[in-house]
């Protein structure tokens, strides 16, 4: 096993861990709607530790992905992607310690910090998927480049959906979950590619 394939396996496991934490939160009796409620609201339930587990796993996975890009690829696109992934990772590692404000509760500094970290994470990982497509293409991996761009599109659709539904909250949770789907799938695909072709 090479270093790259080992990191690829680690990246895939990290992505599956994030998916596992989130799947558990969606089947437990939290009283939240995946259509309306943001994922962050799970932190305000008695299952908040699972949400923090998901954020820490996502942050760890972002660091692993950044390391893989730095090791395996060269050029401007790879460097930009690495920086974006590190922004995502730091934001995800921190966000579990800054819970969102409860619905209808007064706005707080902690809640505003949460919102900033969420925007930073989602914006960075969406941009990373698009930029990485260039790095993969330059490295002679057109299929991976296409899949990376597709993941970026899924996350961008989720972002637009969140902006459109921000006031009414109708469909807000569903739109946000498109972003999660996009980055989990992207990390998994990149990890599997590294694990099987390194």
Image (tube, grey):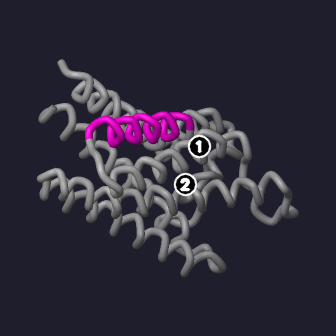
Q: Quadrant of residue 49?
A: top right
Q: Quadrant of the C terminus?
A: top left
| Residue 41 falls left or right of residue 179 | right
Give the distance between the C-alpha atoms of the residues marked 2 and 1, in whole angstroms: 8 Å
Residue 89 position, x and y percent, is 53, 43
Q: Which residues are magenta?
A: 56-72
Quarter holding the N terminus?
top left
Residue located farthest toward the top when viewing the structure as drawn: 1
For label 2, the residue is 121
Q: Is residue 132 magenta?
A: no
Residue 122 drawn at (x, y percent): 51, 59
Q: Is residue 27 left or right of residue 138?
A: right
Q: Which mark is residue 72?
A: none
Q: Secondary structure at mark 1?
A: helix
Residue under label 1, please give it: 90
Name the residue rendered at 33%, 42% in the picture.
69
- The answer to whether residue 84 is above or below residue 10 is below
Q: Nearer the viewer, residue 71 or 27?
A: 71
User: Tag 2: Cα neighbours inside 10 Å, few (<14), some, or many (≥20)?
Assistant: many
Looking at this view, is 139 or 181 the one in front?
139
Q: Nearer the viewer, residue 75 or 114?
A: 75
| Majority SS type along the magenta span | helix
| Residues under numbered marks 2 and 1 in contact, where contact means CB atoms less than 8 Å apart | no
Q: Splitting the image into 4 quarters, where does residue 8 fall?
A: top left
- Seen at 29% across and 42% down, the residue is 188
Marked residue nearer the N-terminal end (2 or 1): 1
Q: How many marks?
A: 2
Q: Position of residue 179 (x, y in %)?
A: 44, 60
Kindly identify the residue that appears in the image at 42 percent across and 55 percent down. 80
């Amino acid at each position: 096993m090479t270093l790259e394939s080992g990191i690829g396996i680690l990246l895939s496991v990290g992505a599956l861990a994030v998916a596992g934490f989130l799947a558990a939160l969606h089947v437990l009796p939290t009283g939240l709607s995946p259509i309306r409620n943001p994922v962050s609201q799970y932190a305000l339930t008695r299952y908040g530790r699972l949400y923090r587990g998901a954020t820490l796993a996502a942050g760890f996975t972002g660091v692993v992905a950044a390391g893989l890009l730095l090791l395996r690829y060269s050029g401007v696109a790879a460097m930009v992607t690495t920086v974006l992934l590190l922004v995502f990772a730091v934001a995800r590692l921190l966000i579990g310690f800054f819970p969102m404000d409860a619905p209808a509760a007064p706005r707080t500094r902690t809640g505003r910090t949460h919102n900033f970290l969420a925007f930073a994470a989602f914006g960075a990982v969406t941009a990373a998927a698009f930029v990485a497509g260039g790095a993969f293409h330059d490295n002679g991996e057109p299929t991976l480049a296409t899949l990376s761009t597709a993941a970026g599109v899924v996350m961008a659709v989720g972002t637009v959906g969140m902006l459109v539904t921000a006031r009414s909250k109708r469909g807000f949770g569903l739109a946000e979950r498109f972003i999660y789907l996009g980055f989990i799938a992207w990390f998994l695909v990149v990890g599997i590619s590294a694990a099987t072709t390194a």
